[in-house]
Amino acid sequence: MKNWIIIGLPALVLVAGWGSLQLYNSNMNYENGLARTAAAKAERQFHPDKIESVAYYNGSESYQVVGGTRNGVQMYFWVPDGKGAYFTRIAKNGITSRQALQILAGMHLDVKTILSVRLGAIQATPIWEITFLNSRGNYNYISINFDNGKEAQRILNI
């Protein structure tokens, strides 16, 4: 019985570790595939000079937000995953992620930890989505309009 435990336990750990690694790799390959597809769609739709980043946003509509340059100008390109609208913005014409965080600070909400600040879209309107935890550990989402800095959506205490 002792030999079975000595042999079986390490074998079980190895199989579990291998399975976890395979699951991680398949998820990363899927995510990288989505990013490559979004970059290709952005190239066909917007003809950027260079693509620098691709970030996923999942709200009421899912978008891949592609960062890059066109004619030497820093741009963001919103590529829908489904039937949403394609659109683009010049980066310097909108607010920055830092400015979105300053707007959040001015709201005087209970913010303990900022989890993410990322570009997204609500009804084909570009937004900065700020995800944070409050002092009770609840998730909160504030969306700030990329173009004018006004609050677009607030989801608190999830």
Image (spheres, grey):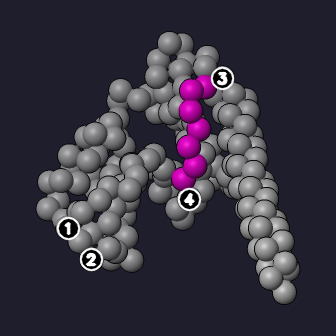
Residue at x 75%, y 51% (from the top left corner): 25
In the rendered image, the vertical position of residue 60 relative to residue 149, given as above or below: below
**Do callouts 1 and 3 mark residues in contact (Cβ within 8 Å)?**
no
The quadrant of the rendering that contains the C terminus is: bottom left
Disc 4: CA contacts within 10 A as few (<14), some (14-19) or many (>=20): few
- Could you say which is closer to the camera, residue 3 or residue 144? 3
Q: In this view, does 21 lie to the left or right of 101?
A: right
Per the rendered image, the range of residues in magenta is 51-57
Residue at 35% from the left image edge and 49% from the top image edge: 145
Res 71 → quadrant: top right
Identify the residue under disc 2.
136
Q: Which of marks 4 and 3 is in front?
A: 4
* In magenta segment, residue 55: yes
Q: In the rendered structure, which disc, 4 or 2, sits on the residue that comes first in sequence?
A: 4
- Closer-to-camera residue (82/113): 113
**Amino acid carrying mark 3 in the image:** His
**Amino acid type at mark 1:** Asp
Predominant secondary structure, magenta span = strand
Label 2: how many Cα within 10 Å (few below 14, some 14–19, many 20+): few
Which residue is identified by label 4? 58
Q: Mark 1 or mark 3, which is nearer to you?
A: 1
Please state which amino acid type lies under the numbered disc 4: Asn
Q: Which is nearer the eye, 15 or 78? A: 15
Measured in 3D between alpha carbons, the distance from the residue under mark 1 to the one under mark 4, in whole angstroms, is 24 Å
Measuring from the top left, give residue 69's x and y in whole percent.
Answer: 53, 20
From the image, tell me which residue sits under label 1. Answer: 110
Q: Which of marks 2 and 1 is nearer the N terminus?
A: 1
- Verify whether residue 7 appears in magenta: no
Q: Residue 47 carries which label?
A: 3
